[in-house]
Structure formats: C-alpha cells, structure tokens
Amino acid sequence: MADDDLRARADARFAAALQAAGARDPRDFYRKQLVELKGADPAAYRRALEYYEQELIPAVARDDSDAMAEWLEYGRVLATLAADGRTVQIDPTGLASDYARPVPPDALVLHLPDRTSVRAIPVGIPAALTPAQRATYDLLVKQAQSL
C-alpha cells in the first residue's frame, strides 16, 4: 500500500472511531506538542516523527487495530519524549493507576513529569470529565487550586 493510501486509510479509520465514540480529536493538541518538541529537542522531534510514520500510521490503518488506542499511545510517546516521568490514568472516581493498555474510554490520561516544576501533560481526555477528574486536571495541568 502506498504511503498516501496508507495515511488516507488511517485517517478514515480514526475519523470513524472518533465519531463512533463521540470522543475529542487529539490531533491539534498533539501537533502543538510536536511544535514545542521541535524547538526544545530536535532529536526527540525526529523520534516522534519516526514513530508517527513507522508505527502509528501503519497500526491505525490495520483492520484489526483500535485506532483510538493507537493515537492515545502516540500521545503518550510524545509526552515521554517531552519530559521524563510516568503516565497515569485517572478513573471517573479520581483513582489513579499506571497507564496500561487498553485504557478505558472514560479515563483521563496524564503524563506526570519527574520535575515537579513542570505541569502534567494531558495525553487523553474523555468526552466528559467527572468532578474528580476535573479537580485532578485543574490541579495537575492548570495548576489551579481552590480552597
């Protein structure tokens, strides 16, 4: 399959998966992360592009793949290239656990950099955040606290 055909197939499969799940499209956010990565660490940027071309697109284009899960994994890869740390998933009750595939569709996925002065990086945001997930997001990503 030619690269353009493969990319078109992957795009179509991901669009269908987004629509079926009623999920947010993360690609604009991931593009912004790529731009930041390009400026901060050109070698990591090249690794991100290599993963996109050699891993993500072929995986999403396959009939037996979970397009949503593959894109979420790409988001995790981008986050780990941007900052050392660990990726967690937050369930609707606010309970955090280590990132593990398959990630439930209602989980908030955040990458927590080792450096505490760096904000958490959103990797996957469910269609609707529960109050516990919203509080976690506000604290770790927005770094907003309320008393």
Image (tube, grey):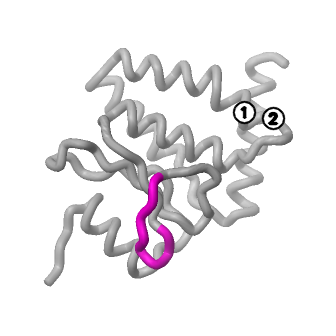
Residue 59's label in the rendered image is 1
- Find out whether residue 4 is within the magenta segment: no
- Residue 86 lies in what quarter of the image? top left
Is 74 drawn above or below residue 98 in the view shown?
Answer: above
- Find out whether residue 97 is within the magenta segment: yes
What amino acid type should be assigned to the residue bearing mark 2? Answer: Arg
How many dots with numbers?
Answer: 2
Residue designated by label 2: 62
Quarter of the image where the C terminus is located: bottom left
Residues at badges 2 and 1 in contact (C-beta under 8 Å)?
yes
Quarter of the image where the N terminus is located: top right
Residue 57 is situated, as x and y percent measured from the top left of the image, at 68, 30
Is 4 drawn above or below residue 84 in the view shown?
Answer: above
Residue shown at the point (37%, 73%) measured from the top left: 134
Q: Which type of secondary structure does the marked residue at label 1 adopt?
A: helix
Which residue is at the front of the view, 5 or 135? 135
Q: Is residue 143 left or right of residue 89?
A: left
Which residue is at the front of the view, 107 or 60? 107
Crowding at mark 1 (Cα within 10 Å: few <14, some 14-19, many 20+):
some
The segment highlighted magenta reads 91-98
